[in-house]
Structure formats: structure tokens, C-alpha cells
Image: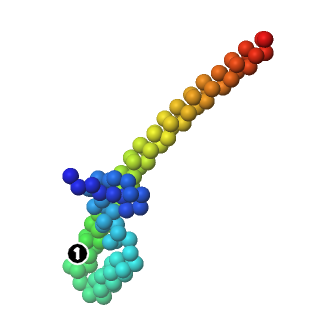
Amino acid sequence: MRRFDHPITGDPISFGEHLSWMVQARIRRWSFVGWVTLATGVCWIIGSPLVLEWWNFSASYMAVFIELVVGIAMYEQTKNDAKVIRKILALESSQFDELKRLIEHVENDLDINDND
């Protein structure tokens, strides 16, 4: 099975998340904004009700599609972040427990020395 890596962190990601990042790399550009703006302007200039209706439906779908693509990446990243946070919390908890044991050990040693 092919492994995909996050384009920024290098962490392993699913095929769906990889696809989402690939699509976002294409649409998060000024050229894409320019293309959509130009297409909208052309449709308005043409002024045909059929063309405007077609463009309205197309632009609406494109907006929903883009939000879903971005949402997939954000949802997956949130899951990955939650995994990392849980690991950090477990590590911190373990370190605090160890520190507590060391403090108790030192306190016991001090008590023994004070009693002598």
C-alpha cells in the first residue's frame, strides 16, 4: 500500500487527506480566483438567463465542493492533533508521577536524616 505524507509536517496521512491537499494546492492560488472572477464576469456580460442559471448552479456546487475538500483536511488534521495531544498528556502524567515519587523519596531521606 502506498504511503502518503503531509505536505507540511511530513506525517503519514490517508489517501483522502492526500487528495484533499492536492486539490487545495490547485485552488488556493490567485490564478484560480482570477479564473472564477473572469468566468463570472463573462457570464454576466452574456446575460443569458440560461448561462446565468448554469453558472449559478456551477458556482454553488464549486463552493460546496471546496468547503468539503478543505473540511476533510481540517477534520483529519484535528484527529491527528488529538492523537499527539493525548500522547503528550500521557507523557506529562508519567513524568509528574515520576517526579512525585522522587520528591517522596527525598522527603523520606530527609526525615531519616533528621531523626538521626
Residue 45 lies, with reference to residue 101, above or below; the image says below
Residue 23 lies, with reference to residue 3, above or below; the image says below
Choose between 10 and 79: the one closer to the eye: 10
Q: Residue at x 69, y 17 (%)?
A: 108
Choose between 109 and 37: the one closer to the eye: 109
Residue type for callout 1: Trp
Q: Quadrant of the C terminus?
A: top right
Residue 110 lies, with reference to residue 99, above or below; the image says above
Residue 17, given in percent of the width and then of the height, sits at 31, 56
In this picture, residue 96 sits left or right of residue 45: right
Q: Residue at x 29, y 57 (%)?
A: 4
Q: Residue at x 34, y 66 (%)?
A: 24
Location of residue 115 by image quarter:
top right
In this picture, residue 95 sits left or right of residue 104: left
Choose between 96 and 42: the one closer to the eye: 96
In this picture, residue 69 sits left or right of residue 113: left
Residue 77, given in percent of the width and then of the height, sits at 39, 52
In this picture, residue 81 sits left or right of residue 54: right
Q: Is residue 19 visible?
A: yes
Q: Is residue 67 visible?
A: no
Q: Residue at x 33, y 84 (%)?
A: 38
Residue 31, given in percent of the width and then of the height, sits at 36, 80
- Tell how many labels: 1
Residue at the extreme bottom of the image, as rendered: 45
Mark 1 neighbour class, 10 Å CA radius: few under 14, some 14 to 19, many 20 or more? few
- According to the picture, the residue beneath numbered tag 1 turns out to be 54
The secondary element bearing badge 1 is classed as: helix
Residue 95, given in percent of the width and then of the height, sits at 56, 33
The colouring scheme, among rainbow, by chain, secondary structure or one colour, is rainbow
